[in-house]
Each structure stands twice: as structure tokens, then as C-alpha cells.
Amino acid sequence: REWEVAQSVWFWRDCSPGMDFQSGTVTKRDRANLMALALASALVRGGERVALFGDGHAPASSRAALRRMAYALGDERSTDALPLDGPVSRNAQFVWLSDFLSPMTAIETTLRRMTQSGLSGHLVHIVDPAEEDFPYEGRTRFEAPGEDLRETLGRAEIVATAYRARFKAHAETIAMLAGKLGWSYLAHRTDKPPQTALIALY
């Protein structure tokens, strides 16, 4: 006989200002929030325990846990892109939703630290279509949200091919790192319906 034990699932949503970027009708932050809450709700209905990492509450299987998650996700005071070091239940699952535009070294250090603490889980790469497709032409000014960084290109289309190749390589590096450490990787564009990604995650 199998001994059925409720699984603990921790969630982390990237809080960096860059998550507020949108080229269409939805920001990366809003899509990540939706996916986190929808997946958490499905897990709670299945009897699993959920919690938002860093909010000070242990995973629980209740509507109260979902309300706490929703409240915390709506709090925009935090600007942490990466999950900080903190206590977690061993052998738990971890769902990390982010645009993963932090430096690769920082992402790798964080992911290795979490793996060594006994966690495994899933990286959900939230991508705005403009970030991947780079549809810009002509004189274009780019600014980094929340930072005093800006760049103006006279002809943005000149760098388009190199940019797309670099963006693809960055995503592939994250996916390979995840696989090497036993985590799964899923890319989701905000111009696509979230249902397919949610089904795959669940």
C-alpha cells in the first residue's frame, strides 16, 4: 500500500520592477500572480499544502492559505527578484515564477542553494512577446525599470538578430541548469492563454 502524505508546495513570484513590463494587455507580474494562485487553488483542492515563500506562514491546505497568498502577491513593496535564504520544509516542491532577467550567476547561486537545502521544483519563465521577438525599429529609447539605466538606439533593427540570439541562449542556459539540478523548466509568453502552462505544471 502507498502511504499518501500531503505535499508541501512553496511559491515564489519575482518582485522586481521589470515584472511590471507589458507590450500587450497584461504585465508579467499579473500573469505570474494569476498562474501562482490558480495552481495553488488546484493543489489545495487536491489536498496539498501551499504557501508563498517569505511571507512567514507555513504551507497549509485551506482557503485561508490562498487568501494569504493573494494578499501577499498584491503587496508591491518588495522588489526582490530572487528568493532569499529562509526556512523551508525538506523534500518540498518549489514553484518559481520569474522573467529570469537577473544575472545568470545570481540565478545559479540561488538555485543551487535551494537544491542543497532539499528542495526541487519548477521554474516558470514568464516572457513578454516583445522581449523575445524584439519588434522595434528606428530610433528607440530603452529604459530599465527601477534603475537609472537607459540606452537610445538610432536604428533598433540593427541589433535585433543578435538580441534574439542572446535572449534565446539565456533561456536555454536556464533550462539546462534546471535540468542539471533536477528541476523542470517551462516558458510561458503573456500573449498565450495560461491554461496550457497550468495544466503542464499541475
Image: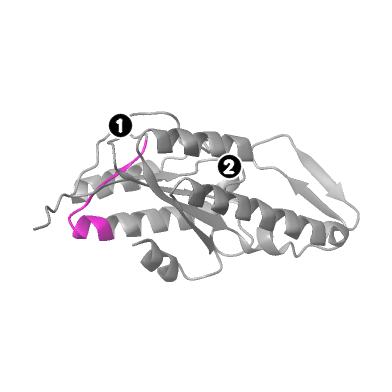
**Regarding mark 2 in the picture, which secondary structure is present there?**
helix
- Front label number (2 vs 1): 1
Characterize the local packing of mark 2: few (<14), some (14-19) or many (20 or more) Cα atoms within 10 angstroms: some
Q: Quadrant of the C terminus?
A: bottom left
Q: Is residue 47 visible?
A: yes
What quarter of the picture does the N terminus occupy?
A: bottom left
Question: Residue drawn 30% across and 31% down?
Answer: 56
Considering depth in this image, is 80 or 122 the residue closer to the camera? 122
- Mark sitting on residue 17: 2
**Outermost residue, left direction?**
1
Left or right: where 59 falls relative to 191? left
Q: Which residue is mark 1?
A: 56
Please name the colour scheme applied to the rendered image.
Answer: one colour
Q: Secondary structure at mark 1?
A: loop
Choose between 182 and 93: the one closer to the eye: 182
Front residue of this view, candidates 185 and 57 = 185
Question: How far apart are the two marked residues, 2 and 1, measured between alpha carbons?
Answer: 23 Å
**Horizontal and vertical percent for residue 161?**
81, 62
From which residue to which does the magenta span run? Answer: 42-53
- Taking the magenta stretch, the answer to whether it contains residue 48 is yes
Residue sitting at x 38%, y 45%? 120
Question: Horizontal and vertical percent for residue 190?
Answer: 54, 63
Residue 77 visible in the picture: no
